[in-house]
Amino acid sequence: MGFWERIEQFDHRWIYLLVGLAVIIPFIFPASFPVSITPEAQSLYDTVEALPDSSVVMLVFDYYPSTMAETEPMAIAAARHFFSKDCRVITLSNIPLGGPSMAETVTRRIANEYGKKYGTDFVNLGYKYGYVSVLKGMGQSIEDIFPTDNSGTPLSQLPLMDSVKNYDDVKFIFEVADNATADYWISIVNAGYGVPMGVGMTAVMAPKFYSFFGSKQIVGLLGGMKGAAEYEILIGHKDAAFRGMDVQSLVHLLIIGFVVLGNIGFFVSRKHRRRIGK
Amino acid sequence: MSGIEIFQTWLVAFFTLALFSFLYKDNPVYKLAEHIFAGLTTGYQVGLIWDTVVLQKLWDPMIYDGKWWLFVPGILGIMMFSRFTSKYSWLSRIPLAFVMGTTGGIFLTTQLHGLVLPAMKSTMLPLGGGGGFAAALLAVVVVVGVISTLIYFYFSKEHTGALGVTAKIGIWFIMISFGAHFGYTVMGRVSLLIGRMQFLINDWIGSF
Amino acid sequence: MKTTAPVVIAFLGGFIMVVSFFFNEETTFVGGLSQELLNWMIIIGGFTLLLGVVSITRVNWAAVSNKKEGWIYKIFTLLSILVMSIPSVLPNSWSPLLGRDVGSIYDWLFNYLQAPMMATMFATLAFYIASAAYRAFRARNAEATLLLITATLVMLWRVPMGESFLNLFPGDIPYFLNTYIMNGANLAVQRGIIIGAALGAASMSLRIILGIERTYMGRG
């Protein structure tokens, strides 16, 4: 067996080991290359920045714990941006696994940083089953769909909700998602009720949403950890996503190296096989 | 770090490493972690649905707000459990039909109004001009890409002649898009690993 | 009865939702009726999720009872279901450890076991995608080569070190990638797929409402 054939067939656990090392090394030797801002993230930031102070906004936690590493930094950055502008934030989730818990934990932590009070400055509606009916139903009455907040307090006892009946009273929706619920926010809520929307999507989902950005159905888009890092830079609070970009750089280069190496091996082996007539 | 915080960090680290151990090979510790994970995930739904649906949407409005008619969806919901009997399993079709029909009614309008029409509009309108050569070039690229992609996925007629050529252009566009998708997917998957490594290195090893 | 009743119910539910789209939701009777149906959907849907929980529990219970392969692990699955669910359905007025609030057993188990384990499960995909890139990502023909080149350029563009590298070349490659690849070719393909899928979803919805599509009822 020749060198390239051996290279082509070595144990995949060596690849795992190299990936593991590529993730660990930047933690020890950070490089801090500059992170550029894409027009999609800039547009999202500018739209939120232009909202009148004290606007009522929705921050939607439509992601599972599985993708927390790339979606939670977006949710945290968005919450920081909203609270820094004294926006009144309504959070909710359409995810039956973790969404309401993560909304509760993240929002309370960031609200504490800005001295915001639950019930007056922010409310967590929690979760209700069936995003299609939830999104459609809130168009008529939020209280009808969510009679209580996540902890069971009736909405009538929360001062923030006194001035909020339905989407007409919401000035902006920031959807952080790792799944197709974002499609329904666009097709049901944005198209049906005209509420401006921005989305933060996992990298896997992001390419699809360029289409909605092009059709102006969303005002901005954050794609994966890079998008989250961009938003952290824009709000002037570099955090987990920005720190993660060094690791991204090294692992991406490693994977490109794997692709190149794999292809060289493929072509050399193919040439060899043709030469010996196999 | 308090004692409970150290315990919590070590507990998370143990299960994180237990699940990562599968990368080397399948083993009993991985299996244990996997089964506990499955159980917790299942159990999470119980508390959530009990509180947010059964109590908040059904029991409380029926008992305290006088919405007695909600017993109908309550019974329809219970009928779902007839699937566990062979004799009465057909009863579960009724609530299922209700959900399917009602969702279909919402989809029929919102998919066309919220997705198809805006997509068609934003594909065609830029062809009207404005924005200079670069914008015009982009508009043409988008129109050709949309039409050729739609034709590639149109299987009711054999892809020959003009249809075949357009479908061929479609596959080139699709390859570019899927390539971009792959590039993004790599970033997504690496992000998830970074999240766990940030925990292991900063929180766990940092606690030593 | 077994087939007709579901078809009629699906038609009525769908018809009301379609009609309500064209009326003012807040002021008309049909708007109020559609809102009521949406609430019913939430309730019924909730029960379907519980159905899944019961089903998983039954399957695991049967495996333990019959001592099927791996039954010892399934005991832990059953115990985990109980430990997570029972305290969460009890009122937190009895104890702050009960219910779903911050500080409850449910919240603790989610934050320190379920969420990190789920995140770890998906984190392993990073290793698999690296392995797949090495073993399966081959420039076998022109189409695959195009895919490979685009993927490599996008991978470089999306990370700071790679973008700095691309900037070493003449011409604004990052601008080209964002404008003509992501907002050009990619946007066009995604839009084509969105149009196709949405038309498919709308026509399938119509088939369900009209009773032509009945496969959701299963057999029998």
Image (cartoon, coloured by chain):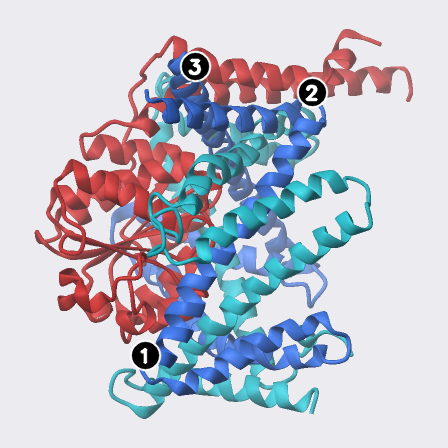
- Residue labelled with disc 2: A12
Compute the Cα span from label 2 to label 1: 61 Å
Q: Disc 2 marks which amino acid?
A: His
Chain identity for the colour red used in the image:
A
Question: Can I make out residue C11 in this image?
Answer: yes
The nearer-to-camera label among 3 and 2 is 3
* Chain identity of mark 2: A
Image quadrant assignment for residue A112: top left
CB atoms of marks 2 and 1 within 8 Å: no
Residue B160, position as x, y percentages in the image: 71, 59
Mark 1 surroundings: few (<14), some (14-19) or many (≥20) residues within 10 A = few
Shown colour of chain B: blue
Residue A181, position as x, y percentages in the image: 43, 57
Q: Which mark is residue B64?
A: 1
CB atoms of marks 3 and 2 within 8 Å: no
Q: Quadrant of the C terminus of chain C?
A: bottom right
Mark 2 surroundings: few (<14), some (14-19) or many (≥20) residues within 10 A = some
Compute the Cα span from label 3 to label 2: 27 Å
The nearer-to-camera label among 3 and 1 is 1
Shown colour of chain C: cyan
The answer as to whether the residues below labels 3 and 2 share one chain is no
Q: Which mark is residue B205?
A: 3
Q: Disc 1 marks which amino acid?
A: Tyr
The residue shown at (17%, 62%) is: A158
| First of labels 3, 1 by sequence position | 1
Compute the Cα span from label 3 to label 1: 52 Å
Residue C76, position as x, y percentages in the image: 64, 41
